[in-house]
Image (cartoon, rainbow, N blue to C red):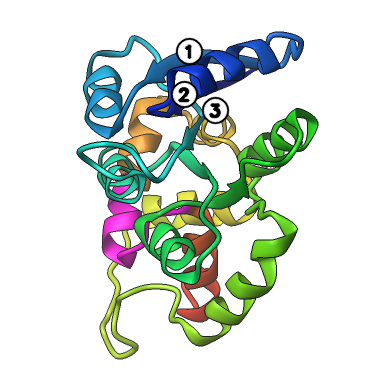
Amino acid sequence: MIKIAIAEDNFITRKQYRQRFQFYEDIKIILMAKDGKNLIEKLSIAEELPDVILMDIDMPGMSGIDTTAIVKDKYPQIEIMMVTVFKDEKNIFSAIKSGASGYLLKDISTDEIVDSIKELVNGGSPLSKSIARKVLGYLQKEEPANVKADQEINLTDREIEILKAIVQDDTEYAIAMDLGISQHTVRSHVKNIYKKLQVHSRTAVVKAAYERNLLK
């Protein structure tokens, strides 16, 4: 079962999400938020956290892009997928920089959204077809992280173990079971790895790990 949260300011769209996902037994909506601030408040008191957040961009108060950066800083294990009508380069690239691992346009089908959610939790980075070419060109020009090439990265032995597991697409639960530690401890290590590499998503971590030769 994949637990998801939805951040969307339009009431009708939120209602449509519930209607669209009710027929998928492996998808469960555990949290609905009307804007970024509301999402952060609900996450702070939630008994269980979502695996994936479907995030709108244009929301009152705090944009989806700003909200994504805050959420990824506090909960790096949560995957975020933008679902929006915006397909301009500025919003696409800002979302990626903030930590989003997927970017979909709202005109796609429910089956496509569900498939993209599953791809995301398995380590992929789903993109609407019309977005993919722009993102590919962007990634070819950008560094995977803000860490300078000559800056030494000091990961602990345990962090290296977890980094290798992340690269292998292991889930938090699998990592915890394999290392004999709690999922909470795994999350703490993941958060530290993200901070040291100055990244906000699993995809960026994997790319940084290879390019910085951290898997020796």
- Of 214 and 91, nearer the camera is 91
Mark 3 crowdedness (10 Å alpha carbons): few <14, some 14-19, many ≥20: few
Task: Classify 106 as above or below 139.
Answer: above
The amino acid type of the residue labelled 1 equals Ile
Q: Secondary structure at mark 3?
A: helix
Check disc 2 and report the residue beneath it.
Answer: 5
139 relative to 128 in the view: left or right: left
Measuring 63% from the left and 54% from the top, which residue is drawn there? 125
Range of residues picked out in magenta: 191-201
The amino acid type of the residue labelled 3 equals Tyr
Spot the residue most to the bottom. Answer: 150
Q: Secondary structure at mark 2?
A: strand
- Of 200 and 64, nearer the camera is 64
Q: How far separated are the C-alphas under marks 2 and 1? A: 6 Å
Measuring 28% from the left and 33% from the top, which residue is drawn there? 36
Check disc 1 and report the residue beneath it.
Answer: 30
95 relative to 150 in the view: left or right: right
Residue 144 among magenta residues: no
Q: Position of residue 82 (x, y in %)?
A: 50, 45
The amino acid type of the residue labelled 2 equals Ala
Measuring 70% from the left and 42% from the top, which residue is drawn there? 119
Q: Position of residue 157 (x, y in %)?
A: 37, 56
Task: Classify 189 as above or below 142.
Answer: above
